[in-house]
Amino acid sequence: MTAQDAAGLLDASAPKAGCKPVKGKPDTELCIVPRAWEPPARSSARPSDELRAGAAATASAATPFCSGNSAARFFTRTQGCLQSLVDVQQFVSGSLFASWTFTYQHEIDLAINSTTFTQRISLTPYRTDLKMVAVSIDIDPKCSPNCTTGPMSWSSPNLWATATDLHTANATVNQTWTGTGGNDRLKLDWTLSGRIEGKQTTTASYSSNEMSVRCDREAKSSPNPGCVFPDYTPTYVVNSEENPAAAAFYWILMQKLPSHPGSRAHNAPLNYLASTPRQNENRKVICPKSGPDRWVGNPASNPPGTTSSCDEYPFAATYQSGGMPPQAVSNGKECTQLYASPLAGGGWTLLEDTNYSRVNTWNEICGRASIPGDENSGAANRIGLRFVPANRMLDKDKFYVSTPGFEECTDLSQICWVRTRK
């Protein structure tokens, strides 16, 4: 719902502005009013409460994603939920004569490899006035631009014939993006209308700008077009168990560098860089393989049986990379310098790399470290191989980075032990 639609509980003692007069009954007005979400009580103290609880359970089965959260609005990259209450009211001579209150759950399920997405809607009587009979609710969904809407399919009637009828009405509708290139940001709109004893109420239109849908044909990670909620910022979770040195390296820089790159706690997301040539240029700047300023691994990070690798953070595939204009450094030597050192009992610790004459100030915009080669490839390569396709990332899309298990590594003045979990 928009902020105006869900501004709070509305005074039900008087007709709402714009209530619809009933033809031939000038003293009677009918309204439909969306309002703020109240999660239904699950009490079973009275028989009527048991009926309401059973109806709510049916609604949850129809909208499983919605049932997992009591918030009025929440969403991930491919699933969204809007929840509200809807009043259908009859006023006679200026006084409330009869009313129904419905819980309204609206789930939107997208697909990263399809331009067709599904909306599931459930309406469940929550509070009723026994004077009310024969009430129905209709929903008219729309989307634009370049979008078609299929027929609304009701799996159970959207008509409640008596005040004791507490069944849940479930509806499903498919919408399809028809754009032929690039991407479109789709605006989803809905209009609610009702009938009381066959007489038309007012209508209520609403939308959710935050949950607009982006469909595209340009994601290089997928051969098929698809759709996501672009305003949801996903999190790249590093496999800390398999790549402990790399994970600790990222975590320390997120905490200590002034920009806190990738940190959700500091509201500092990274922006995905889709250009492969530009990614490679960033790597050449931070970890050059030749020339007088070429990167040389710390010998301590290359014991027998391992290979040392130059790992950089922020990642080369982000606009925050130290090699990316306009903030670009001239060479990776200007980044924070660290190295992973093996521990006698197994595992690794991270230390400042004293092989470089410049002392770390922790005011750098980037960092690089000598870490085992398998960790570098494992921790960073999954961004392009898995994370980007799974979230249908386009150029400049935001994301956070998470390194589970290394939240204690906040200060190099304390030894940061990096051990593989057993």
Image: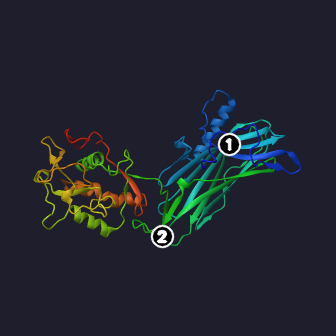
> Outermost residue, top direction?
45
For disc 2, the marked residue is 182
- Mark 1 is surrounded, within 10 Å at the Cα level, by few (under 14), some (14 to 19) or many (20 or more) other residues, namely many
- Residue at the image position 25 percent from the left and 58 percent from the top: 377
- Where is residue 368? Give x, y as percent: 22, 55
Q: How many marks?
A: 2
Q: Which of pointers 2 and 1 indicates the residue nearer the eye?
A: 2
> Is 168 positioned to the left or the right of 117 in the image?
right
Q: Nearer the viewer, residue 298 or 220?
A: 298
Marks 1 and 2: in contact by CB < 8 Å? no
Q: Say which element carries label 2.
A: loop
- Where is residue 14? Give x, y as percent: 76, 39
355 over 150 or under it: above or below: above
- Residue at the image position 56 percent from the left and 55 percent from the top: 209
Real-space Cα distance between discs 2 and 1? Answer: 40 Å
> Outermost residue, bottom direction?
180
> Is 167 positioned to the left or the right of 183 in the image?
right
Q: Amino acid at mark 1?
A: Phe
> Is 223 positioned to the left or the right of 153 in the image?
left
Where residue 419 sits, quadrant-wise, is top left
Q: Earlier in the sequence, mark 2 or mark 1?
A: 1
> Is 420 positioned to the left or the right of 110 in the image?
left
- Where is residue 8? Give x, y as percent: 63, 40
Q: Say which element carries label 1.
A: strand
Q: Amino acid at mark 2?
A: Gly
- Residue at the image position 42 percent from the left and 63 percent from the top: 394
For disc 1, the marked residue is 102
- Residue at the image position 43 percent from the left and 69 percent from the top: 223
Q: Nearer the viewer, residue 22 or 300?
A: 22
- Where is residue 330? Give x, y as percent: 22, 63
Coloration of the structure image: rainbow
